[in-house]
Amino acid sequence: MDQFLRWAKFSVIAAAVLISPVLVFFIAIAVEILIGVVEDAGALPFVAFTVAGAIGCSRLRKLRARRRGIVPIAT
């Protein structure tokens, strides 16, 4: 049974590594859609880039918090 658990753990890790580029691609598409919505609402392009920057800062802050072992702040 121990061999099966080890095999299952490594297969889950491998699947996560293979799927992660797809998830990053979907996140990039979501940011592009959000920028388009902000621009279509009549806001200046600067506002759209500010929204994209805020999303990026939020993601990076959560990533850095996970590395340090701190519980990420919910945004």
Image (spheres, grey):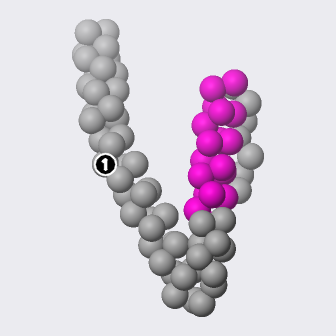
Characterize the local packing of mark 1: few (<14), some (14-19) or many (20 or more) Cα atoms within 10 angstroms.
Answer: few
Identify the residue at horizontal 64%, vertical 72% (top origin).
Answer: 46
Residue situated in front as seen by the camera: 1 or 34: 34
Q: Quadrant of the C terminus?
A: bottom right
Identify the residue at horizontal 63%, vertical 84% (top origin).
Answer: 43
Q: Quadrant of the N terminus?
A: top left
* Residue 33, x across and y down, in percent: 45, 73
Residue situated in front as seen by the camera: 31 or 22: 31
Badge 1 amino acid: Val
* Residue 66, x across and y down, in percent: 64, 31
Pointer 1: what residue?
22
Q: Is residue 32 left or right of residue 41?
A: left
Q: Which residues are magenta?
A: 51-68
Q: Is residue 73 left or right of residue 27?
A: right
Residue extending furthest toward the top: 2
Whether residue 48 appears in magenta in the rendering, the answer is no
Residue situated in front as seen by the camera: 50 or 66: 50
